[in-house]
Structure formats: structure tokens, C-alpha cells
Image (cartoon, rainbow, N blue to C red):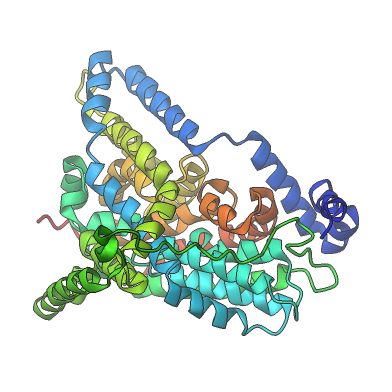
Amino acid sequence: MSRRAATDARAVTEQGGAGRQARDGFWARLALRFADFVEKWFPDAFVFALVAVAVAAVAALIMGAPATAVADSFSAGFWDLIPFTMQMALVVVTGYVVATSPPASRVITRLAALPRTGRTAVSFIATISLATSLVNWGFGLVFAGLLAKAVARREDITVDYRAAGAAAYLGIGGIWALGISSSAAQLQANPTSLTPELLSITGVIPFRETIFLWQSLVLAAIILVVSVTIAFLSAPGERHAVTARELGVDLTEKTATRRRRERPGDWLEFSPLLTIVVALLVAGWLLREFANGDPIVVISNLNTYNLLFLALGMLLHWRPRSFLDAVSNAVPATSGILIQFPFYAGIAAILTRAQSGDGHTLAHLISEGFVNLSTPGTFALVIGIYSATLGFFIPSGGGKWIIEAPYVMDASNAMHSHLGWTVQIYNAAEALPNLVNPFWMLPLLGILGLRARHLVGFTFVQFLVHLPLVLGLLWLFAGTLDYHPPVHP
């Protein structure tokens, strides 16, 4: 493709694309305008974290907490989440490593050959994204992105590359938090990952009381079916599809340069011997854990979960050198987690530790506010709306839960609402703003070679449908569950 042709194509798609956008209809035009607004006015997510620190500090001072108490709480609590921060970073790294392994690449090639039309290809990518995100959101995001790129390389069908990219993102914007890599559910199931203040409020909540509730499984299934249907209906037909080539994206499959052994010391880097030893050790330990304990409890341990994916990634790459190269490529995607989670821990400490003269904390006052605003019948709806709104400004499932959980779960106890379902209310509602906030799109955009505005146009249509659907189902299912007091370890 000539440089002039590529320039003209980009002009059609990025500077209005009046003809095609007009044929795409009202929803596409509205969504693309919203995408332009988000890209122009939304700062980096780290700025939102800093704003949240300032708001929490000022609110605590207004409440009557001494300035020294606010400063001490923030500084002491800043490091409370270091173990959990490392755990969540490893979720991203191990998921990426597995998704980019040679066996996974072969599976992607075979899957990419299955769809028969451009629109079915988009819905197929959406299905894969949603299903894989239930296992590991990092894996699902990368795997679906590579699948979208592989489908776009096909010459026998015409696929709208924007719609395919948006479909690859639906796992993060749909049901990832209802799966086993859910930050909030993992956190609540692991007492060593909880702050002391939160543990005293919630106790330990196992997976069977969160993601394995039948209400949660039905909710995930409904969201999956609806998301795939919308992906199919909103994808442009082949006549109006904007291809990767028209967007100026180079789809040439780049073959990684294989390093060769250059010195005797390199031998072990290219030998599978040590990989096999590590895999056998992990497999033996896991078999014993599953044989002696409840499988649900075993898999809900975030350390076990990460160790399993780490060993799987090593096996799939086979040689330590290939594994290390994949890890190096994955690390940049963890930067937001590594720098922002400590700030979220500091915010949570201000909320739960800085006390006013009468002994009240900010978390206690917010909890009372939720209780006053809600009734047992409306609590799920109020919490869902609040969590979704806050998610626009703090796009982090685990970090935001640390901030919200002390007062949300305290209010849940006061309202006698099912604690596990309150976690799931948070999980389902927290995923909604991901459909329009580009923070978690960054790893995917790097794979696809696109900008956020290309994807948000389609994910915004999903958001408009998901918002009333998810909130309504959260409210409906809340009435089917009874309250159980916290269980402390």
C-alpha cells in the first residue's frame, strides 16, 4: 500500500469518515463522538489516583481529623498492599506469557480460520474474549487481541478491524470480574491479602459465596450472550467495514529473532531440563493440595493461581530463554498496577484510620450515608451505581475495592445484605466503565496498532445496553440471597 493511499485511508476514518459513518447509523456516530471526548479530556489514570488522594485527605480534614493523623495514615498505609500489588502484577505477566506461547499461537491460527463472514468473525472474537477472561483477564485480553489480528490477516473475508478490536476487549468490559481472576473476590478469599481493618468488617469470603453463586454464574452467562449479540449486530457489514489496511495498520506477522547459543553458559537457557524440573515440583504440590483440600478453596488462593499459570507459561514456552523474553514483553503492561496500587492503599488508610475528635472515620460516615440512602430493596442498586461511577475515575478492580470495601461492606452488614453478593455487585458494576475508559485498553492497543477512539465507538454501544441490564439483574438477584454474618479466620 502506497504512503499516499494510506494517508487517504486514515483521513477517511480518523477525520470524520462522513460517508461510512453516516451509513453506520446513529449509534456509531454518537459513540465515535463520545470516544473523541474521552481521548481529548481524560487524563492518565494515575492523575485520577492523585486526585483521589487529595479528595480523601481534604474530606478527612473537613471531618475534623488532625492533619498529622491524615499524613500518618496515608504514609503508614501506603505499603499495606505490596503483596497484593505483586500478586496482581503476576496475573498480568503470567496471562501474557501463556497467551504468547508457541502452542497458543498455533491455536490462534486455527481459531482465526473458523469464521465465514466478517460479522461472525467479530462475534466469534467477542465469545473467545469473554470466555478466556473468566479464567485470567490478562490472558484473555492478549489472546483475543492476537486472535483479532490473525482474523484481520485473512484475505477471504472482510472484517471491520475497529469492531474486531472492540470485541477483543469485551472480556475486560464485561465479565472478567465474575471469573476466578477477580481482584475483589480473590482479595476477600485470602485473609493475608486483606488489610486488618477490612478483615475485621468482612471476614473471609470464599469463592462459593462470590463467583460460584448460581446468581453470579447466571449473570455472567446473560452478559456473555448479550455482549456477543451486540457485537454481531453493531459490526459493519463487509461493504462498509473499515479494514486494518485502510486504518494504516501493518498486519505483517513479525517472526521473533531466535537467539542462538553463543557460549557454554547459554546451554541451560535453551534447554528444557530446568523447566521440566520446576513443572514437576509445581504439579506434585498442586496434586497434593487438590487431593487434601477443597478445590474451590485451593484455586481461590491467589498465590496458587499465579503459581499454576507461571508453571504453565514455562511449559508452553519450553525453554527458559523463550519464557524470559515473554516476561520482558509483559512487564510494561504492569506499570499502572505497580505505581497506582500503593496510592490506593494510602487512600484506604486515610478512610479507615484518620479519626475525628469524636472517634469517627471517613469510611464510617460514608457507610452511614449509604445506609441512610438505601433500603434493603434498593441497596444493590445504590452500590452498583456508585461503584460504576467511581470506576470512571479509578479504573482498577483491586485497588478501587480496597478504597470502597471498608464502607461498602460495613453498610452491607448494617443493611443485612449478603456479603458475597455485595462483592459481586461491585465486580459486575466495576466492569461497566471499562467499556468507555481507555486505561485497560492500553495493552490491547499496542497489539492491534490502534488508538482508543477506534475501539470506544463500539464498546460505548455495549455500555449503553449493559448499564441498565447489569444494574437491573444485580437488584433482582439480591432479593434471592440471605445475609450471613462475617466469618473470621
Image quarter where the C terminus lies is bottom left
The foreground one among 487 and 55 is 55
Q: Residue 475 location, x and y as percent?
A: 45, 61
Residue at the spot x=76%, y=74% of the render? 158
Q: Residue 126 location, x and y as percent?
A: 58, 71
Q: Is residue 279 left or right of residue 229?
A: left
Image quarter where the N terminus lies is bottom right
* Image vertical order of residue 238 relative to residue 333, above or below: below
Q: Is residue 80 left or right of residue 3?
A: left
Q: Residue 188 location, x and y as percent?
A: 25, 55
Q: Quadrant of residue 104?
A: bottom left
> In this figure, what is the number of numbered marks?
0
Residue at the spot x=36%, y=70% of the render? 317
Q: Is residue 4 left or right of residue 376?
A: right
* Image vertical order of residue 463 relative to residue 11, above or below: below
The foreground one among 441 and 359 is 441
* Image vertical order of residue 322 relative to residue 374, above or below: below
